[in-house]
Image: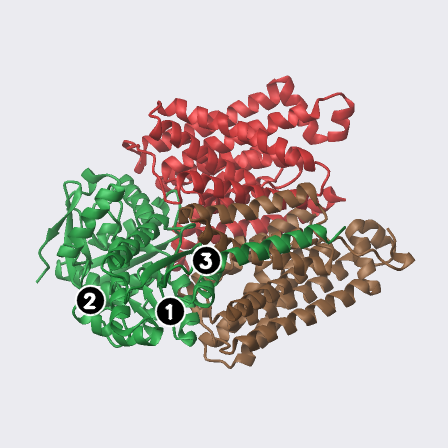
Amino acid sequence: MTQILVDSLVYAAEIAIIAIGIALSYSVLRFANFAHVQFAVVGAYLSYTFFALLGWPVVASVILGAVATGGIAVATDRLVFARLRGISPDGKMIVSWGVALFLRAAVASVFGGGARVFPLQPAPLSFAGAYFTMQDVTVAAATLLAIGALHLLLYRTKAGTALRALAGNPDLARTRGIPAERMIALMWFVGGSYAGLGGTLFAMQTRLQPNMDLIMLLPVFSAVTIGGLDRVFGAALGALALSLAQNLLISVDLGSLLTGQPWSVPTQFRDFIAVGTMVLILLLRRRGATAQAR
Amino acid sequence: MRTCPTRRIVLSMLMLTAAALPARAAEPTVPVGVIANLTGSDVPSSVDMVRGVQLAADELNAAGGVQGRKIVLITEDSEYRPQAGIEAATKLFDVNKVEAAIVFGGSSVTLPIAELARPKGKVILNTSASSAKLGGYPGTLYSTLPLDDIVGAQVGAYAAKMGVKSAAFIVPNNTFGTGLMDAAAAAFTAAGGTVVRKIAYTEGQPDYRPDLQPLQRAKPDAIISAGYGDDTRTVFKAARELGITAPWYVAYPSIFAVEDPAWLNGHMSGLDNGGLDSSTGQRIKAIYAQQFKGEPRPHYFYGYDAMMLLGRAMQKGGTDAAAIKAALPLVAKDYDGATGRIEWDDRGQRINPPMDYFAFRDGKLEPIAAPK
Amino acid sequence: MIDFAIFAVTMIAIWSVLGISLHLQFGLTGLVNFGQVMPFAVGAYGAGFAAAHGLPIAAGIAIGALLTPLLGLLVIQPAGRLAQDYWALVTLGAGEIFRLTMLNVPAIAGGVEGTTVYRIADRSLAMLLALALLGAAALLARRIGRSPLGRILRVLREDETLGATLGRNPFALHRLVTVVSWTLAGLAGVLYAHVVGYLSPGAFTVGETFLIWTAVVLGGPASLPGVVLGTAVVELTAVSTRFVAQWSHLPFELTANLRLGTFGLVLVLVFLFRPDGLLREAKARSDADRR
């Protein structure tokens, strides 16, 4: 049981940082940004370049990778999304898919389509019957730190207040003299670097591949949806809820409870659970959503 | 004005197509199609397959080609998507007029290509897909690797011979994984073993601890497994973290990626398509090391054999598909390939493949004797 | 060469039907379906189910044609009143749920292994069938677009409240559009299965949905000829880049990636420089329709 909790926590930490960025951009720009997940892949490749190819220290590589990804996100906004502020949310969604496709091809052209692995050998640990590694601890700690830092930024700084005002009521914020475009750039930078950080942590745990965004896409969007699309910290909780739901469902022996024959949900249904939860939550929330849309 | 950009796009596309079309007809050549997933999943193995094919084509050309004509390879991307694979095959068959294509790709890509090739009477040489369904295309599809039903049965029997009484399975949830698992489980059960848990995991996940926990709870004597490098590394990592100590019996240990060599030392053994120690296998392995550095993946050898067999069949019978079909089984009889002797049944599928047994010791696979 | 042209035309026709289906939903009505591959997959799997269980081809067609609108209603019934981007995520999820079910439940049509379906041997016949389906779909869409219903749908697209004040129930109309457009896509799926001869879940991913979207957005979602043109351009780009790749002599892995990157770039550039697509919505002729 402790093991299930540990597994869930680690997986939640991996997707939470990425999910936060999507919620952040949704709260300000009001569209689901598919390119965001691809930023995570770009960030992971950048950190990999610094660490494994240039031999820089791991922490510096990760931070630099995240910052550079933030820069790429801002550049993407300047080049593409800034020119499309006026179009409908679904139009932006489609454009973001185009951006993702382009970035994926760019990454694959530079690094090749094969998988790469961060050359790390984390030490195994064990606590209260659960097994995990030093890396798991680092991932969880980094995620908590990142969430804390974002909280400070949003609630303890002027820029954060402005950003929240922009998310709450863009027109009012503009008339109050908040420099909307600069705040939006800040939002892209923060979102982009969080994606880069999340992607790096994800890749350290598994591997790097240009199309790993497709593996992260559904769980991440599911987490954001559970948390409530525009609620930044909700996304982190959503990641935890999803992760717990997945791991509990596949480990509970439903068969013994119901029929006496041991049987539990096959593990390949994890994705199924993620998507199913997302759809279910969306349907249950429809009243609120409709009210908001009108 | 409205139609102007449209027309321009269509026109430029037509021009591009036209520019690409005329086969540079300086000297007569023999086109051979190659379809591989150059983007998408499993790219490195695909690339190695193409390298093997290229090497064989170069060697055939250096020795005079096919009746004085040079073999020209036309390589297409299947993107690991059935739709793109069909597109690639249609282009090769209808525009490039190839009579035969060498295909790398999962069964989901290879099967629709075979479906397309059969009514056209073309020849497919399969270098990677191993679903038992591929046996349903006699006279169209020839495989240089044995299908899952054959290898799977041998893995199951091997585990039983090693004294394993209860086993759990963990394989990727794809045709390769589940096909192999089912065949191995059947053979293992037939030899008196008990299967306690079967797990098919989704490829590409960051963590397989949740998948391995049910396996751990089932307390098997041993784990029987198959998988592709990238995922197997994550599976081993999860097993190590969970403290799973059961030994591993695996199909194709050479495509496994070991995460922590010290932990796995002496814990993994299995069987692989053999014959790679043949003189041809050793020779082309050395060429690979020289050209690209490092060790080739097994598909390099399957690709090499596919092209060699195809080249020899064309030399013997002629370059049209019917002649190739007639000649392929004949040239296979006295071909000593990079993957050993190639024996085809009447479906064109490999039987009695040479199998090598390996154990993982001191960071590498060491050959061991076949179990009695 | 002629065979290749036949193949290309067949595929363009089938994907154009999907495009028209999306044109009805998005271009005309404003429904953002990010699971457009789902009705296509349901149709194809209707044929696949029939083939895997030894049923006649007609049964497959019937299953595909009936199941698709039913599932469409099942998706829109609870989700119909959602805001557009929520609806987009719901349809995206529904499409994935269908694919994952086909992947993990082998009893339906072979699971990961996929299933072989009767393949139309006469390729010209396949092309004619595809063109006939495209013709029927185009006529139907044109008819809907020019009817009073089409006008109301356009009003709804621009302003749902206004539509409602005109005494129309937007939801009932959305349901109607879903049934019609999903059935079209389902029929395209049935035909696709019989053209290709083999089905597996890998052919119906999120990526396919976005390929259809690229085509529709490129051509002009609100214009019927635009949708067909967009599909033709996307399909021909996919095909012609193969020739460019072969002719350029760049490393094969690089050209393969550049090919895919081109699609992303086209999608972005169209939005930046030609947001209505290549062909704009034909100007409505009646006064009542002037916006």
Work out how far the residue at label 1 is from the one at label 3, CA to CA, in angstroms. Answer: 23 Å
Work out how far the residue at label 2 is from the one at label 3, CA to CA, in angstroms. Answer: 29 Å
Color used for chain C?
brown
Q: Can you say whether A101 is above or below B24 in the image?
A: above
Q: Can you say whether C61 is above or below A34 in the image?
A: below
| Foreground residue among B271 and A267 | B271
Q: Can you say whether B27 is above or below C108 in the image?
A: above
Could you tell whether B322 is left or right of A234 in the image? Answer: left
What chain does mark 1 sit on?
Answer: B
* Label 1 vs 2, first from the N-terminus: 1
SS assignment at label 3: loop
Chain letter tied to red: A
Q: Are labels 1 and 3 on one chain?
A: yes
Chain letter tied to green: B
- The residue that mark 2 highlights is B342
SS assignment at label 2: loop
Q: Amino acid at mark 1?
A: Glu
* Dot label at residue B81: 3
Q: Amino acid at mark 2?
A: Ile
* Dot label at residue A36: none
